[in-house]
Image (cartoon, grey):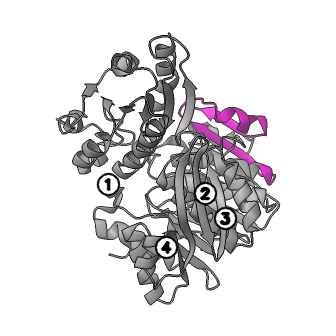
Amino acid sequence: MTTPHLDFAQDIDLSRVHLIGIGGAGMSGVARVLLARGKTVTGSDAKDSRTLLPLRAVGAKIAVGHAAENLELSGQLPTVVVTSFAAIPQDNPELVRAHEEGIPVIRRSDLLGELMDGYTQVLIAGTHGKTSTTSMAVVAMQAAGMDPSFAIGGQLNKAGTNAHHGTGDVFIAEADESDASLLRYSPKIAVVTNVEPDHLDYFKTHEAYFQVFDDFAGRITPDGKLVVCLDDPHAAELGERAVRKGIKTVGYGTFEAAEAHPEIPALATIVDSHVVAEGTRATINIDGKEVSVILQIPGDHMVLNGAAALLAGYLVGGDVDKLVEGLSDFSGVRRRFEYHGTVTGGVYNGATVFDDYAHHPTEVTAVLKAARSRVETAGQGRVIVAFQPHLYSRTLEFQQEFAEALSLADAAVVLEIFGAREQPVDGVSSEIITDAMTIPAVYEPNYSAVPDRVAEIAGPHDIVLTMGAGSVTMLAPEILNRLQD
C-alpha cells in the first residue's frame, strides 16, 4: 500500500492565523514561531492551561471553549484556520464557520511546512524518541552557535519552551507519522530513530505503517541524506531499501550494529557507554573523530538518541566539539524521565519520583530499563510504576507486550485506560494488562486513589515512575506529596 501524498493549497496567506486546539504541544509551538515573525495569531482550546499564558503574553488572542465567533478574536476573520484532523471533529463550530466563510483550512503539518520553507530542514521521525532526539539536536546546535529555529513536541527543561524562531538557516522539527503528515515535508536531513507498528487505528496494517517511512525517505532533497538507527531492525531495513533506490543514506548505532549493516556507512558509532553518578558516559565516534559525552538522561535508548542528534548537527555544518558540549548540558524535556523530587526523611526516605510520556511497550521497556540501571548503580531501592494505558485500540493491540514491559518493574499500579479521542470499548479495561503481568500489580480504576495505592507498595530509595500519555502526569506531584507526608 502506498500512502498518498498530502494535498496542500499553495499561496496560503499567513498574515492572520487561527489555531483550533492552540494549547496542544504541536500547535502552541507553531503559534510561537508565527508570533515571533510578526503574524496575527488567534486560537481556541477546550480548557485553559499553563501553555496559553505565555502565548497571550506575546500577543496571541485565545478563547477557552469552541465557538463560531472565536474566528473574529482579532477583529477580523483569519486568513487561514489550522486544525488537527485527528483531534478536532468536523462539526467543531469554528471549522464549520471557516468552511462557510470560504477560509482555507489546513493541518498543523501544512503550516509547519510553510514555516520551514527556505530553511535547511532537519526532520526527526520514528515511532519512538522523536521529541528527545529533536530536543538534543536543538541544544547541541545552539551550543555550536547555529541558533536554529525549532518546533518540538515537548518543552525543553533548560529553555522552557517548545519552539523558537532562530537567526540561523537551520529549522529542526519532529516529523509525525501518526496520520502520515510527515509527507508534507521535504527535508535535507531526515533522521529515523526506529520503526515499529503503531497508530493502527489510522494505518490499519503494519505494511501501511512501514510504507509511510519509505515514502518519507523519498521526499528527501537531492542533496540531502537519510539517517537511520542501525540498532533498530526496521529502521536499518528502511535504510537498506533507500540505498537500493539511490537515496544517500548513513547510519548511527553500536559498533556491532554497524558491522551488521556494511552497506550503510556508519557515521556515528557508539564505542562505549556506562552509567556514572552524573548519568551515562558515552564515547561516540563521529565520522572518524572520537568524543566523550555525559548524558544526564539515563538509558541506552538515550545514548542512541544522542548519537543521532550529534550526527544531525554535524551533517548541517556544526562543530563536533561544540555540539558535544551542548549535548552534555542537555537536561531533558518535560515528561521524558522528568524529575519531580526526592522524599527526605520518614518511611519513604530517599524515594524519588519521575514522570515519563512512555505509552508504547517499547518505550515502557526502555524507560524501565533505565530506571533499573539507576537503582542497580545506587545499590538500593526498587522500581515502582504507575502506568496509564493510552487508547483502547493500542491497549488491545499490545496488551501482552504491555504486560511483559511493565513486568520489568518490581511492582505496578495500573490505571484505567485513557481513551483520548476514542470511545470506551465494552468489556475492555486495564485488567487485560494486569491479569497477564508477572509482578505484583494493582488495577486501580479510581484515579484519585492512585497515590495511596503507590504508598502501599513503595519504600525507601525506590524510583517511582508515573507513566503514560494521558492525565497520569498530574499524579506525579501528588504521589511525591503523599510519600513526603
Q: Earlier in the sequence, mark 1 or mark 3?
A: 1
Which residue matches tag 2?
A: 134
Q: Give the percent coordinates (x, y) of residue 216.
A: 49, 73
Q: Give the percent coordinates (x, y) of residue 300.
A: 48, 54
Give the magenta range: 36-65
Residue 201 image label: 1
Amino acid at circle 2:
Thr
Foreground: disc 4 or disc 2: 2
Amino acid at circle 4:
Phe
Distance, label 4 to label 3, CA atoms, is 31 Å
Residue drawn at x 40%, y 45% is 369
Quadrant of residue 338 within the rendered picture: top right
Q: Nearer the viewer, residue 24 or 230?
A: 230
Quadrant of residue 151 within the rendered picture: bottom right
Q: Earlier in the sequence, mark 1 or mark 2?
A: 2
Distance, label 4 to label 2, CA atoms, is 17 Å
Q: Earlier in the sequence, mark 3 or mark 2?
A: 2
